[in-house]
Image (spheres, rainbow, N blue to C red):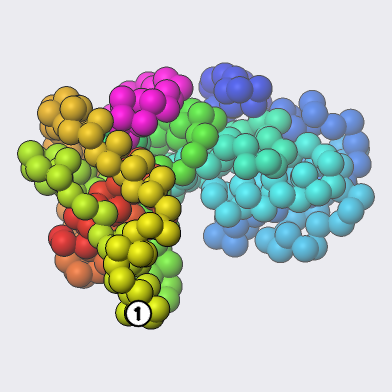
Amino acid sequence: MCDIVRKDDINGTEIFVTNNVGQVKEMISQYIDGGLVAILYDVKLKDYADSLARCFKGGNHLVLITCIIDEIPTHTRFIVGVGAGRISEDVRRMATSLAIDCALVFSAPTTDTILTSNGLKGFKAVFLDEELISTCPKECVASGVGIILSEPLRKFEDYYLDKVLDEKQCDDTIGALTQDNDRINIAYRLLELSATRTYTDNAAIMAGVLYDSARRYGTPTRLLGEYKFVSASVIACLYESYLSSPSIDCTIPPAHDLKLDALQRLTGRAMSNLLKAFDFFEIDGYFRVGYILSEYRLDLLEKLRAVDFHSAQKKWRRLYSDAGYWLKGAFTTKSLLTALRLSAEISHGLLRFIAESGFADAC
């Protein structure tokens, strides 16, 4: 049997790069002496799950393979997931519930949530099977690359949080991609990202809105990483447009005006009386942030323009066989702007302030 190609450690989780399903079994056997091993697989990966189960044959483990999480019994001693985002979450949730260890065969570089805590039990090991990952569709690769190419926007937003809101973010810079078609490298970078995630960034929030909108209106959904890169590109355009305006420190928060107007219509009271009863703390905070933002506006604009999203977009589109032509049928200007405005309401940092200023509604 061939040796593992590579072994690393990310925040206590062992990462194995291998090209042999039997090696996956050998490493898992080191974590458990005997008992029932449950293999929870994505329905598209049944053949791989069957191959992994056969490797346990003749040993001192009982093996259950299933694609339904509810079929995993309570006397299970170890859980192995074969899949990506959804399988990863299901496995960790079940392992947490049963207080047992788990591992994952990460089948496609589609998500940056694999090692994110979220209050769930972490993986003992994650396996990157070169043969398995090489068979994943191109959109899976584009999803992972899209997440990584969105990172400069998140780093820009961290810079805003530090300079304007005095909220210092940890430095979680990851290694650069070696080449776009190196799927193992992409998967590894996503694992690194997932281990450092402390909050959901604005591009991810907008990606969720785009996904939910597609489901709501019955249109074909894409992977969240694909939505995230599209979202990052849209948000970056909004930021540049907003920061390019020298009068951003003069805007008035329209949300407050609307509330006051509504109260005046409902109660019939004079505006002067309403102003006396109105809590100015939030308004004061708004103008304080606006003032600090005006001081750092040009610095922020310079930092944003240093990110070459144009080249990133070209690189990303060329991951598809149609060079990204599918985008023309997936979105309209209206749908993107609607998702942007909705996500801005539940965002943070600069995007939230832009929403408060009413600038996003004017787009």
Please tell me whether residue 331 is drawn above or below residue 319 in the rendered image.
below
Give the x, y percent position of residue 95: 77, 45
Q: Number of marks in the image?
A: 1
Does 311 sit above or below residue 231? above
Quadrant in which the C terminus is drawn: bottom left
Q: Residue at x 12, y 28 (%)?
A: 298
Q: Percent position (x, y) of residue 293?
A: 23, 33
**Residue, x 9% and y 43% (percent of image)?**
247
Above or below, 316 against 17 in this view is below
Task: Check disc 1 and give the amino acid type.
Answer: Gly
Where's residue 255, x and y in %? 31, 61
The magenta stretch spans residue 263? no
Q: Main secondary structure of the magenta part?
A: loop
Would residue 264 appear left or right of 12 to someone viewing this image? left
| Mark 1 crowd level (few <14, some 14–19, many ≥20, 10 Å Cα) | few
Residue drawn at 39 percent across, 78 percent down: 267
Looking at the image, residue 311 sits to the left or right of residue 106; the answer is: left
Residue at x-position 73% and y-position 60%: 69
The span shown in magenta is 157-182
Quarter of the image for residue 182 reads top left
Dot 1 corresponds to which residue? 268
> Can residue 184 be seen at all in this image of the molecule?
no
